């Protein structure tokens, strides 16, 4: 997990912290998907990463950190890259609907 100033407050409490390597990044199974993988394919270790995320006390903070950063790879806040893209689209639709743009 990258360690930026925005992440620093909550990242120390992250369940993945014991799995991080010295440069602050998580092991490959938190962030592996090569450019040739189909997004529908499961990445090796994805279930392991998600299992750790499910126990994390700062999962929501992690997800909120990752959502506005579409270039982040791997599992963040319990969601994969494709799941975060879908969540961003869903939130945009809700925001548009709440502002009354759709349906008028």
Image (cartoon, rainbow, N blue to C red):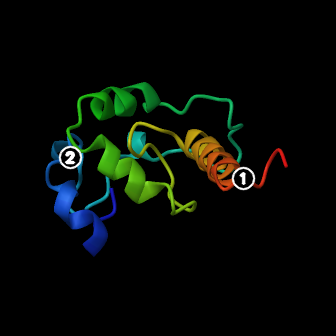
Q: Quadrant of the N terminus?
A: bottom left
Q: Of residues 3 and 21, which is closer to you in this image?
A: 3
Relative to 27, say whether 22 is above or below.
below
Q: Which quadrant holds residue 66?
A: bottom left
Q: Which residue is at a point 42% across and 25% down the rendered structure image?
A: 47
In the picture provided, is 36 more to the left or to the right than 63? Answer: right
Label 1, on which residue? 100
Relative to 41, say whether 23 is above or below.
below
In the picture provided, is 80 more to the left or to the right than 3? Answer: right
In the picture provided, is 15 more to the left or to the right than 1? Answer: left
Q: Is residue 4 visible?
A: no
Circle 1 residues within 10 Å: few <14, some 14–19, many ≥20 = few
Q: Of residues 10 and 41, which is closer to you in this image?
A: 10
Q: Look at discs 2 and 1 and give the one toward the viewer.
A: 1
Under circle 2, the secondary element is: loop
Q: Earlier in the sequence, mark 2 or mark 1?
A: 2
Q: CA distance from mark 2 to mark 1?
A: 37 Å
Label 2, on which residue? 14
């Amino acid at each position: 997990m990258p360690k930026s100033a925005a992440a620093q407050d909550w990242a120390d409490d992250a369940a993945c912290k014991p799995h991080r390597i010295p440069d602050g990044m998580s092991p490959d199974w938190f962030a592996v998907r090569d450019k040739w993988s189909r997004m529908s394919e499961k990445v090796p270790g994805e279930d392991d990463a998600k299992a750790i995320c499910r126990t994390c006390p700062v999962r929501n903070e992690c997800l909120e950190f990752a959502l506005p950063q579409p270039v982040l790879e791997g599992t963040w806040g319990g969601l994969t890259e494709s799941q975060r893209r879908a969540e961003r689209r869903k939130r945009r639709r809700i925001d548009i609907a709440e502002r009354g743009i759709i349906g008028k």
